[in-house]
Amino acid sequence: AQEVAAGMPFNPNKAGEHGDASRTPQAGATCPMKHLFGGASTTGETTASDKVGAGIQPQGVNPTVDPLDRVRVDATGQRLTTNQGVPVADNQNSLKVGLRGPTAMEDFILREKITHFDHERIPERVVHARGSAAHGYFESYDNYSDLTRAAPFADKGKRTPVFVRFSTVAGERGSADTVRDVRGFAVKFYTDEGNWDLVGNNMPVFFIQDAMKFPDLIHAVKPEPHNGIPQAASAHDTFWDFVTLMPESTHMLMWHLSDRAIPRSYRTMQGFGVHTFRLVNAEGKSVFCKFHWNPVGGTHSLVWDEAAKIAGADADFHRRDLWEAIEAGNYPEWELGVQVFTEEQADQFPFDVLDATKIVPEELVPVQPIGKMVLNRNPDNFFAETEQVAFCTAHVVPGIDFTNDPLLQGRIHSYVDTQISRLGGPNFHELPINAPVAPVHNNQRDGMHRQAIHRGRVAYEPNSLAGGCPFQAGMAGFTTAFSSIDQKLQKPEDKVRGKPELFADHYSQARLFWISQTPSEQTHIINAYRFELSRVTVPAIRVRLLSMLANVDAELAEGVAKGLGLDVPAPMPLATNAKAPEYAPSPALSLLARPGSAGVKGRKVAIIASHGVDAAGVQAVYADLLKAGAVPRVVGPYLGQLKGVDGAMLDVEISFEAGPAVLYDAVVIADGEDSAKSLQMEAIALDFVRQQYNHCKPILAIGAGASVLKKLGVQDQLPSGQGDPSLWIVDAGGVTAALAEFKGALAAHRNFQREAEGSMV
Ligand code: HDE
């Protein structure tokens, strides 16, 4: 209890601001020392470890649920009010002077409603505008404190809540999900020592080496400024004009033109931190680190024809997939891996680790798995969470630090800066989705939309009036505060605009990527270059691209040139003094050579049927797939019920029109003479199977269902004389055995042998 000097003005509800009490630290201004040292909090907060990250949470319980609870709104059973809480009696009619008269200015209810509506859009992100997000947790496999003092890695089994946003880069907020583009993979860890944002992509390199070129790159790829065309596509003049004048983009272009740029789902793509970061342990010792997210569901992509069709059939394909998987309890998972190496090792590499157009090959430094991430809860509100979340590369925590990568250095500035216009001021960190679960205490004050109500009169440091609080955490021997690593410069450096010499090698890793791809992936890359450059209208740009590719691989350059009706020109001149290392192929760079997925979780299987179907047979297959975690759907000519052979009825869940082939990973053609006959009469059903076949997906035809394949001319033999390993034609008795193999093929996803052998129908 604090004494109040006699005769001083005193409001007992604000003891801290009057009398003697004002000369001692006040309740709301007390420092968090006890709190951070694990004792009882002086601010009434529970200890950090109660809130986040300690111990193992029960499955499905996310510690970020609690901090967001205080701002959740549920109108169930509530009356309608204005924003001032005034109950509203009539939400249908404005207030008029006479029933047919003008609206009264005093209708504050109408005006409030319209005014709010008029302002409900905010600017979209300048890049990565289109995205989807989910909550989940990260769980550390062990105590990695010898490597880093970062809170998420402090204990085996320790869980840290995360919010993850996936995105495309070029498209506007309403653009389609399956366009050819890099995907953003941004993870916000709500650690007990503040928020750490690992703002990565699904490709481990980038187009440019220096932040100075980012606005140019984005201006080139976005819709052209005179006509606003094209939306969410790099297949246009300005993009290819720019990148072919920037040979440093060669390596990233290989990734961008590969199947990585058309992922099957967010659940089946890798993520990368891209830059070299530092991990710092409690002794201040640091090592270099590259971050990798590897999906447990395997790495799978679409084929281009399919991606283009999905953009029309379901522009929300990836958003829907993520949402539905989480709603169904098929929680997407990734393993976090790190490549750790020392500065001395890095000095020996034939590339510069500060160059974001280079990878550190896994053969050189293996990826060490250190934890897993599970996404297990969809947001409650798209705008409040997915749209308002603000990631920033500058958000690091003790134990994580930057390197001098000139691209990363520029990003450290850009992300906070961009939120100031996008989210309307400097207090976006107070939005519930952005607020750390760790306590925030500093002397920053005011600004637009400030939420915190700071107590006391002290907003400066040093101070004595608040007992010196909040105090610098580095004081009092407190070791886990953030302090930048103590980097010794080898010699005094000149202030200079330029690049290190090794940055000039633009082709050897592009070649490494190329030689590491399987033949079908190489074909897809050639086709993608042909498509993109055919959309370019200026011939000189095509020629420049070919002279770039000539430095990567002759077969690649020739393959692309053929599609463009050109000859391969002389290669672009190489930068002088650039070392050009020769790499052996790295299977880790191929989507298809990577380890497959463990199962069929969340894979969509169409079971197509019509009247006269073997309904019982379909139900058995359906149940089996569902049990394995796949998502079967009965697709038929129209909604309603199909009459089965045995009189049993079968519900059609979606029609061929509304659920086209491209939305499914595989197809089962049901048994039943009449059903198969009807399917053969329906162009849309035949087209469904044709696309499944041509997109190299697993097909299981049961009994009479085989006649649909016959009608299309689909063989169970490939031209090479081998059987098609993803196609089963069985009678009712063979279904069980075939289903087991079918699920294996579904996990592996596609059989590109069909494409390679030209057996398309
Ligand atoms: Fe970004 N980037 N970026 N970027 N970036 C943004 O920040 C920027 C780069 C990435 O889901 C913006 O909040 C610069 C590389 C993702 O909200 C902006 C440079 C990588 C997201 C920005 C880069 C990324 C962004 C726009 C070069 C992969 C979406 C809105 C120096 C490692 C995050 C925003 C989300 C978003 C700037 C290059 C990934 C303008 C200046 C390299 C995943 O600040």
Image: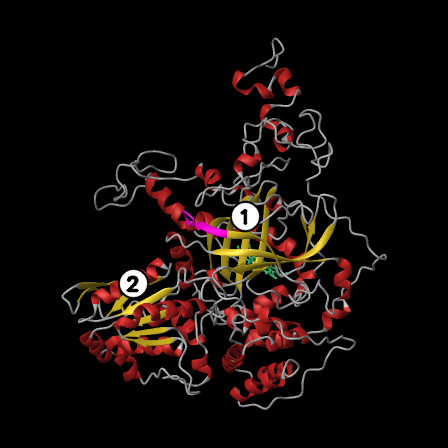
Residue 86 x/y as whole percent: 34, 33
**537 relative to 495, above or below:** below
Residue 644 x/y as whole percent: 17, 68
Quarter of the image that includes the C terminus: bottom left
- Identified at 54% across, 50% down, the residue is 390
**755 relative to 444, above or below:** below
**427 relative to 349, above or below:** above
Quarter of the image that includes the N terminus: top right
Q: Range of the magenta residues? A: 374-381
Give the residue type that dot 2 points to.
Tyr
Quickly name the residue at label 2: 622
Secondary element under disc 2, as helix, strand or loop, is helix
Whereabouts is ligand 1, in terms of quadrant? bottom right
Residue in the foreground of this view, choosing between 366 and 284: 366
Residue 307 x/y as whole percent: 43, 71
Is residue 475 magenta-colored?
no
Please tell me how crowded label 1 is: few (under 14), some (14-19), or many (20+) other residues with Cα within 10 Å. many
Hey, which quadrant is residue 730 in on the image?
bottom left
In the image, which is nearer the foreground, mark 1 or mark 2?
2
**87 relative to 387, above or below:** above
Res. 540 in view: no
Give the residue type that dot 1 points to.
Glu
- The mark total stands at 2
Residue 101 x/y as whole percent: 24, 45
Residue in the foreground of this view, choosing between 430 and 302: 302
Sooner in the amino-acid sequence: mark 1 or mark 2 = 1
Residue in the foreground of this view, choosing between 701 and 722: 722
